């Protein structure tokens, strides 16, 4: 199944909903960062959320960044999405091994520990919008539910799931975000809460072969859901050698001179996709001119 997001409404626009399948995207991230299973689960959940939150943005140039910093062994995660659901992300520490929880599931909460969730939206204003909350569980879905309620005053339900196979590849990944709009009445709220309480986990649904459309219809059963749009989502990093050159120039002539004095070709890696970029001494000398100017 290809990765994509479904956007829907229900109850005469009292509810908006998103559901996504992101298995290929999360598998690409796992492969690029060589993540251990618990890190794959944490990064995959955050990337899935970012893909849906990115698709909420209005303009093509808008960007959203989800950043977690915790005192657990992963230390943190950074994920970015644009309005077309092009997503990239990386963990601070890709290799973390922890015992499974008593229910046999990966312990994402312990891997992240206590910390902060930052949501940064760059929507073309002078300064980006920054929202911040404490991690309430470290399971990511609950943390985002809390963020929506406290920072954006939008009552929401978030479900995220990543199922890691025995060979550490990603077997299934997906999620949903259901939000109540300001005109939602009490009856709708109660009906939605009842439906969500009866839903199996997102990984169970995907293991059964359920599509995002079917997940939406199950969540909003009896509430007249209407599918408005489907949108592809993918892992995509827009790094280039030119961008890395600009970053090198920005560190200043002193540091570039030190690299030149070592007399060796240097290697720089992109955090998001691990692509390697090489700069010879002659190239560094050319960049030094720009740094001085």
Image: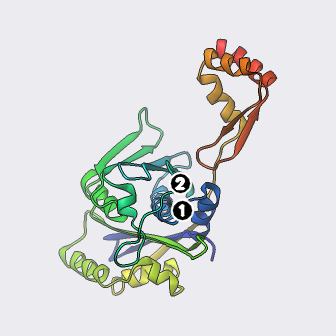
Instruction: Identify the residue under disc 1.
Output: 36
Viewer-closest of 32 and 79: 32
- Which residue is found at the position 33% from the left and 75% from the top? 12
- Which residue is found at the position 47% from the left and 53% from the top? 57
Query: If the image is split into quadrants, where does the N terminus sit?
Result: bottom right
Instruction: Identify the residue under disc 2.
Output: 94
Q: Can you name the residue that lies furthest to the right here?
A: 282
Viewer-closest of 14 and 277: 277
Vertically, is 239 above or below 292? below
Sequence-first disc among 2 and 1: 1
> Dots 2 and 1: beta carbons under 8 Å?
yes
- Which residue is found at the position 63% from the left and 54% from the top? 236
- Give residue 116's position: percent from left, percent from top: 33, 48
Q: Is residue 114 visible?
A: yes
- Which residue is found at the position 81% from the left and 22% from the top? 282
SS at mark 1? Answer: loop
Query: What is the spatial separation of the Cα atoms under label 2 and label 1, in whole angstroms?
Result: 6 Å
| Label 1 packing within 10 angstroms: few (<14), some (14-19), many (20+) | some
Residue 289 lies in quadrant:
top right
């Amino acid at each position: 199944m290809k990765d994509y997001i479904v956007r829907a409404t229900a109850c005469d626009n009292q509810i908006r909903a998103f559901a996504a399948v992101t298995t290929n995207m999360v598998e690409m991230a796992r492969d690029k960062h060589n993540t251990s299973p618990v890190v794959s689960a944490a990064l995959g959940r955050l990337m899935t959320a970012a893909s849906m939150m990115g698709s909420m943005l209005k303009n093509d140039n808008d960007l959203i960044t989800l950043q977690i910093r915790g005192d657990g062994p992963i230390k943190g995660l950074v994920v970015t999405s644009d309005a077309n659901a092009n997503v990239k992300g990386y963990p601070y520490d890709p290799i973390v091994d922890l015992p499974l929880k008593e229910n046999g599931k990966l312990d994402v909460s312990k891997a992240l520990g206590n910390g902060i969730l930052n949501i940064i939206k760059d929507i073309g204003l002078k300064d980006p919008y920054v929202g911040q909350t404490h991690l309430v569980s470290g399971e990511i879905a609950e943390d985002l539910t809390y963020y929506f309620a406290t920072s954006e005053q939008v009552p929401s339900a978030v479900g995220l799931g990543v199922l890691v196979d025995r060979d550490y590849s990603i077997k299934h990944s997906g999620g949903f975000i259901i939000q109540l709009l300001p005109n939602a009445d009490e009856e709708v709220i109660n009906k939605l809460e009842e439906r969500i309480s009866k839903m199996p986990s997102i990984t169970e649904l995907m293991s059964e072969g359920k599509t995002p459309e079917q997940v939406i219809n199950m969540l909003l059963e009896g509430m007249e859901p209407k599918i408005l749009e489907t949108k592809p989502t993918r892992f995509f990093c827009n790094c280039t050698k030119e961008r890395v050159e600009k970053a090198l120039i920005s560190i200043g002539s002193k540091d570039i001179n030190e690299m030149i004095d070592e007399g060796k070709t240097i290697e720089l890696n992109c955090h998001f996709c691990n692509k390697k970029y090489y700069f010879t001494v002659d190239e560094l000398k050319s960049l030094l001119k720009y740094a001085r100017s």
